């Protein structure tokens, strides 16, 4: 029977001129000694003796090139296998849909790797830190619980422990201000150019007793307690296959899917039995969170199921249609304000619907969590609020605390992402 290894998805962020591409590329090239398949990302099949002859930016440049050719496509991944895990690296800087893709699940954010540069010039340092703060707020809003901060260009500050500690403490203080407590966070002094602390311990940084970038990744996990929850599987496509029947295709986000299970599709309430399924042409006894697969059902036409429907176990907390929901929303710095009564496009998993801001319950200070104003009529860019939102079309959405992948969303206006949100409570329409 087909056996899968756990997948750890690493989302790469970084400030301007942080050396993000060089750092990730040099890391991958060092790993290619143990994982030769990584050489394909350097457009070669063999190791080059002198690392100085390698352009370490090639892997991420190639990803960016693919995105520029088709900015609507799902992100490309850089994959490698180590320590009994499959790791997938996604560089999403510059991709206009990167927030949408994290929300939809096209990019699963188990770990965020932030690359920041240890700068000597104060104006550069301050500009960079503003970018880091926005990325930390984004990671918090998206529910990411594991962070690695690679403090790059340590060689430029002469491998200074003081410079490293200064930036580490500044980031720590900001995390405390916004009440962001990741389950794990690593600060690592690295040199993307020279390779210090990427895979092997650096002899130039003897004062640092922590992990290398590779060792930190080994500490990360995919927090797969989602398997214990009831089934939730957003549907991405529906096919009709001769001799098989209707085949919905999607990814299991929580719970387990098994043949013979009675499936309820939400928001329609349609019932059908799961007959059989395969993944990568291998028969399977069950599908677990992270599995992209299709399953066959009989007696149901393809037109009766829509993209964005959610499959659930009909006998264990089945998914329901949402009437309205409460959510904490964070407006992006680049967005316009949001007002009561405003109609926006809501994106979640594989669907989008129109929704109305029914009321704004209160504004919230991003840093302290203190309520700033009750019942405001609007929230400005960069602000945060608790709001009641009403879907104007059928929608299945869940509380983030119960079903994290179905409890985070984005709002867009005129094709611009205005806010990210975490669902706190859902009013559902129950179906007998």
Image (cartoon, grey):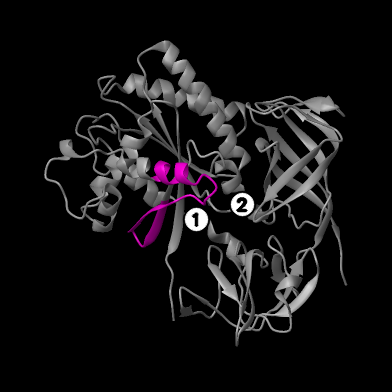
Image coordinates for residue 392, horizontal then vertical, percent? 84, 49
* Residue 270, magenta (yes or no): no
Q: In which quarter of the image is residue 207?
A: top left
Q: Judge the density around disc 1: few (<14), some (14-19), many (≥20) Cα neighbours within 10 Å.
A: some
Name the residue: 78% across, 36% down. Answer: 386
Of pointers 2 and 1, the one earlier in the residue sequence: 2
Q: Quadrant of residue 263?
A: bottom right
Picture quarter with the N terminus: bottom left
Q: Judge the density around disc 2: few (<14), some (14-19), many (≥20) Cα neighbours within 10 Å.
A: many
Name the residue: 69% across, 51% down. Answer: 407
Answer with left or right where residue 4 lies relative to residue 202: right
User: What SS does tag 1 mark?
Assistant: loop
Image coordinates for residue 327, horizontal then vertical, percent? 76, 42
Q: Which segment is the magenta one? A: 63-88
Name the residue: 69% across, 44% down. Answer: 422
- In the picture, the disc for residue 104 is 2
User: What SS does tag 2 mark?
Assistant: helix
């Amino acid at each position: 029977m087909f056996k899968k290894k756990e997948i750890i998805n690493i989302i790469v962020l970084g400030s301007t001129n942080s050396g993000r591409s060089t750092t990730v590329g040099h890391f991958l090239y060092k790993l290619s000694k143990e994982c030769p398949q990584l050489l394909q990302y350097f457009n070669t099949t063999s190791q080059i003796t002198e690392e100085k002859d390698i352009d370490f930016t090639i892997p991420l440049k190639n990803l960016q090139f693919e995105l520029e050719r088709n900015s609507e496509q799902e992100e490309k991944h850089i994959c490698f296998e180590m320590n009994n895990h499959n790791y997938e690296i996604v560089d999403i800087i510059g991709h206009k849909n990167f927030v949408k893709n994290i929300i939809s699940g096209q990019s699963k954010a188990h770990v965020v790797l932030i690359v920041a540069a240890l700068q000597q010039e104060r104006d550069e340092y301050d500009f960079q830190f503003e970018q880091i703060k926005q990325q930390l707020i984004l990671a918090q809003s998206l529910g990411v619980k594991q962070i690695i901060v690679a403090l790059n260009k340590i060689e430029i500050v002469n491998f200074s422990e003081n410079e490293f500690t200064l930036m580490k403490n500044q980031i720590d203080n900001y995390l405390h201000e916004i009440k962001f407590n990741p389950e794990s966070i690593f600060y690592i002094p690295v040199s993307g150019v020279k390779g210090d602390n990427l895979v092997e311990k650096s002899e130039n940084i003897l004062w640092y007793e922590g992990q290398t970038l590779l060792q930190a990744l080994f500490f990360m996990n995919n927090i797969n307690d989602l398997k214990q929850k009831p089934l939730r599987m957003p549907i991405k496509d529906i096919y009709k296959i001769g001799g098989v029947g209707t085949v919905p295709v999607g990814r299991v986000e929580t719970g387990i899917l098994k043949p013979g299970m009675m499936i309820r599709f939400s928001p329609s309430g349609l019932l059908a039995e799961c007959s059989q399924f395969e993944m990568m042409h291998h028969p399977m006894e069950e599908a677990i969170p992270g599995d992209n697969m299709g399953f066959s059902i009989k007696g149901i036409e393809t037109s009766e199921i829509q993209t964005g429907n959610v499959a659930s176990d009909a006998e264990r907390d089945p998914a329901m249609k949402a009437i309205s929901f409460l959510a904490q929303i964070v407006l992006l710095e680049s967005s316009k304000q949001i007002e009561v009564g405003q109609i926006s496009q809501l994106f979640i998993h594989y669907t989008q619907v129109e929704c109305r801001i029914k009321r704004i319950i209160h504004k919230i200070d991003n840093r302290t969590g203190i309520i700033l104003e009750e019942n405001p009529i609007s929230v400005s860019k960069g602000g945060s609020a608790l709001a009641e939102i009403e879907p104007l079309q059928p929608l299945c959405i869940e509380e983030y605390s119960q079903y994290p992948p179905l409890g985070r969303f984005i709002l867009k206006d005129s094709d611009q992402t205005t806010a990210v949100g975490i669902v706190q409570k859902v009013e559902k329409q129950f179906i007998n």
